[in-house]
Image (cartoon, rainbow, N blue to C red):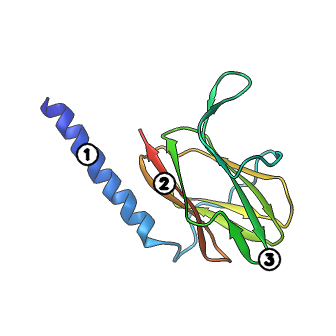
Amino acid sequence: MSGQMSVMKAAVVLGVLVSAVVVAGCGTPPATPPEAPSTESTAGPATSSAAESSAGAAVGPVVNITIAAGTVTPTNAEVDAGVGQPIVLEVTSDATDSLHVHSIPERVFDVQPRAGQRFEFTVDIPGRVDVELHDLNRTVVTFAVTP
């Protein structure tokens, strides 16, 4: 039983550390280079939870992001995700910007002024992960990542 308590305490401490990193914000650029967008896709609902793909494998949340005339939708959305589960951001934009994922490791996706951009990533540490739009200085979505 004490072994389980130690693991639980370690998970809580790790969660607090991840939260502290997220609260620190976007003051400096990430140490890792920006990732290139993956494959393009068509737009769907604004957000969706875990679903089954045609192959039967579980897929993670999909968040559709629209940037138009200086406004981003959604703003401050909250979405659940699981550790190691693919998270997809589908973006349509009329401006160049970058999405910063405050995870470990951090990720930056370059947004171009076009429709059908698709960015996929996973999170391996439970906690809250903010996704911010740099030039518009907005939090788009926060993922509550659970084991």
Q: In this view, does 113 lie to the left or right of 28?
A: right
Residue drawn at x 34%, y 59% as measured from the top left = 17
| Earlier-in-chain disc, 3 versus 1 | 1
Q: Disc 2 marks which residue?
A: 104
Q: Which amino acid does label 1 sit on?
A: Ala
Q: Position of residue 34 (x, y in %)?
A: 67, 61
Give the structural element (helix, strand or loop) at label 1. helix
Which of pointers 2 and 3 lies earlier in the amino acid sequence?
Answer: 3
Callout in the foreground (3, 1): 3
- Residue 108 picture location, percent across and down: 64, 61
Above or below, 119 relative to 132: above
Q: Name the residue type under label 2.
A: Ile
Question: Dot 2: what SS?
Answer: loop
Marks 1 and 2 sit apart, C-alpha to C-alpha, by: 17 Å
Q: Which residue is situated farthest in the right direction here?
A: 114
* CA gap, disc 3 and disc 1: 45 Å
Percent from the top left, x then y, of residue 5? 18, 37
State the residue in front, 67 or 14: 67
Amino acid type of disc 3? Ala
Q: Do the residues labelled 3 and 1 touch (CB within 8 Å)?
A: no
Q: Badge 1 local density, few (<14 within 10 Å), some, or many (20+)?
A: few
User: Is residue 15 found left or right of 22 in the rendered image?
Assistant: left
How many discs appear? Answer: 3
Q: Name the residue under label 3.
A: 69
Residue 10: mark in rendering: 1
